[in-house]
Amino acid sequence: MSRTWVVIVNYRTADLVVDCLRSLVGEREALSGGGVLVVDNHSCDGSVERLESAIQAEQWQQWVTVLPQSTNGGFAYGNNAGIRVALESAVENDYIMLLNPDTLVRPGAIAALVEFMDGNPRAGIAGSLLENRDGIPECSAHRLHSPISELDTAARVGVVSRVLRRHVVSEPPSFEVHRCDWVSGASMIIRCALFEQVGLLDEGFFLYFEEVDFCARAARHGWEIWHVPQSRVMHLEGAATGIRKAARRRARYWYDSRRRFFVKHYGVPGLLLADTLWLVGRSIFLLRRLLPVRGAERAEQDPRWFAYDLVWGDIRALVTGNAMNARSGI
């Protein structure tokens, strides 16, 4: 059985990481001689000490290693630090699994991914079925973001989604193994041979969209992306980042990552088209709120300044030339 390394990036979430590690104890056999690499992104809150203390207390030294970093370079940066260490002892058929700190792995989750990858040599990436804290499955396999998909994302109207069905990014969760454009970076396994062609994660993404970009690049090199629902992982979404969907202001790096993705894959004209279609969709959504229709209350899910921050942030980046930096990314 192929060896598997698990990479977990920690930033001030040591308690979550310890819980995640406990869920991995029963999965050690599936690692087949690999291990878990916990990358601490310069937490400076005692995380490293708490993690190392827990590892000693639970006697996990043989399969868990903490890798402290000197800076917090973001999710891609932290994962790359662990990936580089894993690749040093990897062979062609080995795998690296990226796992969020705010996850709990269900029994057999890693074995299911490894078994699938072993049986499908063109599969470069496979993702788990994610469940929320209540055990309810969530969409874990997605279509690629595109300018057209931004219209549906902003409108959130059934008739628009039906017309643009082929462009809807996230549909209801599927319980069948199937190919997709990208899977959630909260739990995804990657064939080591893929890194030779695709490279590492793009560290220009501080947080969000890095797995979308990585899967798109892998597909461009001929690798297949798969959703494997037999692998189930509970994802306590937002617990690691502290981001709440209804927060007053979304972190700036989310907008930066979205902009980087669209410029990198569709060019500046693609970003402008995406924003234009998003504004059209937003207008449809706001009009819908004025009508006495069911579901209009969903507007409260967006941060108060979401539209302003998205549009004005992109305009400012284009005027200053900062938006062009994404073209030189991996």
Image (cartoon, rainbow, N blue to C red):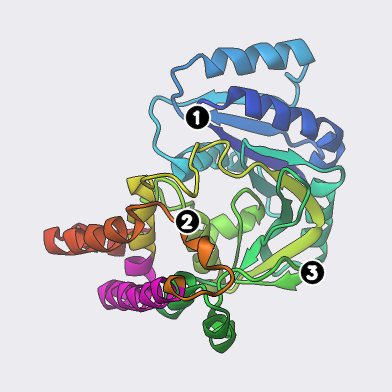
Label whose residue precedes the other's in the sequence (1 or 2): 1
CA separation in Å, label 1 and label 2:
29 Å
Q: Nearer the viewer, residue 67 or 18?
A: 18
Q: Circles 1 and 3: CB distance less than 8 Å? A: no
Q: From this view, report whether residue 152 is shown above or below residue 77.
A: below
Residue placed at 53% from the left, 56% from the top? 211
Residue at the outermost front position = 292
> What range of the chain is rendered magenta?
262-288
Task: Please give the residue where the numbered disc 1 appears in the rendered image.
Answer: 11
Label 1, secondary structure: give it: loop
Q: Amino acid at mark 3?
A: Val
Residue 264 image offset from top left, x and y in percent: 35, 66
Task: Please give the residue where the numbered disc 2 appears in the rendered image.
Answer: 300
Mark 2: give few (<14), some (14-19) or many (20+) Cα within 10 Å: few
CA separation in Å, label 2 and label 3:
34 Å
Q: Is residue 322 left or right of residue 165?
A: left
Residue 30 in the magenta stretch? The answer is no
Label 2, secondary structure: give it: helix
Residue placed at 75% from the left, 56% from the top? 137
Q: Which mark is residue 177?
A: 3
